[in-house]
Image (cartoon, grey):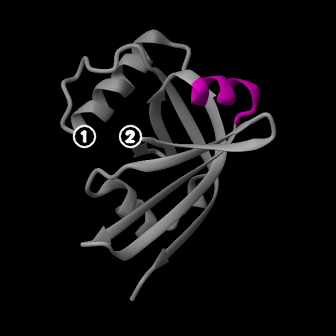
Amino acid sequence: MPNAIPEDAVEALTGDARVGHLATSHEDRPHVAPVWYDYRDGAVELVTTGKKLENIRRNPRVALSVQDTDDGDPKWGLTLRGTATVVEDDAEGREILRRINRRYGADEGDWAENTAVRIEVGSTNYWTYD
């Protein structure tokens, strides 16, 4: 669903690297944790392990929240809701990891134990604080 993200929200997602907060479901309760991400071609990519990955495998419905501030004063925020898919192809997963690590200034091989996940965005809320 390529039109699920407004153009100004795409610019916010692809600008400076920010930490997102991924919400998954664990036993019908929310589980929220910080993640690094990359946005490309209408989807959010991230790498994860542990509880988040287990939750995605059980229930792929997720949300990602990202916000930007200026010395604590909010500038903009967005929430994406969509369906997560675990990337099973090892080469594709390694490339996603490399892209994310480059985006956040980490060595390309860092966090190699993590598994790549792609979120197809179904809906978006984007707001600014003007």
Name the residue: 55% across, 22% down. 50
Amino acid of disc 1: Tyr
- Seen from the viewer's position, the closer of residues 87 and 76 is 76
Q: Is residue 108 left or right of residue 44?
A: left
Residue at label 1? 104
Name the residue: 22% across, 22% down. 108
Q: Magenta part of the protein: which range? A: 51-60
- Is 59 in the magenta? yes
- Using the numbered discs, state the Cα–Cα distance from disc 1 to disc 2 in whole angstroms: 8 Å
Pointer 1 with pointer 2, Cβ within 8 A: yes
Prevailing SS of the magenta stretch: helix
The picture places residue 32, in percent across and down from the top left corner, at 58, 45
The picture places residue 94, in percent across and down from the top left corner, at 37, 17
Mark 1 or mark 2, earlier in chain: 2
Amino acid of disc 2: Trp
Name the residue: 46% across, 45% down. 41
